[in-house]
Amino acid sequence: MSLPMLPTEDVQTYPRPPLLESAPYPIRVEAEGQIIINTRDAWRVCETHHPPTYYFPPEKLKCELLPAKGASVCEWKGQAAYWSLKVGIEILPRVAWSYPRPTRRFEPSRGFVAIYPTALERAFVDGLEVSAQPGDFYGGWVTENLSGIVKGGPGTLHW
């Protein structure tokens, strides 16, 4: 087993507007007792005071995507569509989102799917276990290589 190669990063130094970049390290996601993602083919979005959010090609998901109600708009990425995941016989309602028609800057991530880490049993980025960004709105993936103040907890909503 190789050691994680993720660099130490301070979320306070991430840019605004956010950065979209390739995430070529191994990412494994488990839900409902199954590995639903095991890939090195992902994008990540890094934004000031947020841990990275990871976006996966839908063909890499080992579960079914079901359309979910609702939409939201990100001033940087465009209008989001929401998804439920069917894993085996279980349905995880409205736990994922994508940008079917992203802004030009985020075009490479068109149709890629992000998943709220709170919906997952376990997730790993380059061998580092993921915990969820605080709050119920954001979908960032916190790993031990990150430092700085992460938005989402009490008193940080309007930063």
Image (spheres, helix red, strand yellow):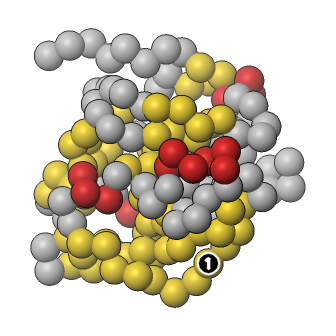
Q: Position of residue 12 (x, y in %)?
A: 74, 28
Whether 84 is drawn above or below 48: the answer is below
Quarter of the rendering containing residue 5: top left
Quarter of the rendering containing residue 111: bottom left
Q: Which residue is mark 1?
A: 71
Whether 116 is drawn above or below 49: the answer is below
**Residue 89 appears in the rendering:** yes
Q: Position of residue 116 (x, y in %)?
A: 46, 59
Q: Position of residue 8 (x, y in %)?
A: 54, 15
**Residue 133 appears in the rendering:** no
Q: Position of residue 156 (x, y in %)?
A: 80, 50
| Residue with the most extreme right position | 158
Q: Amino acid at mark 1?
A: Ala
| Apparent side of residue 33 relative to residue 27 in the rendered image (left or right) | left
Residue density around tag 1, few if under 14, some if 14–19, many if 20 or more, within 10 Å: few
Whether 119 is drawn above or below 123: the answer is below
| Apparent side of residue 101 relative to residue 12 in the rendered image (left or right) | left
Along the line of sight, the residue nearer the viewer: 58 or 115 = 58
How many marks the image carries: the answer is 1
Along the line of sight, the residue nearer the viewer: 142 or 78 = 78
**Mark 1 falls on what kind of element?**
strand
Residue at image location 38% in from the left, 63% down from the top? 119
Residue at image location 27% in from the left, 79% down from the top? 91
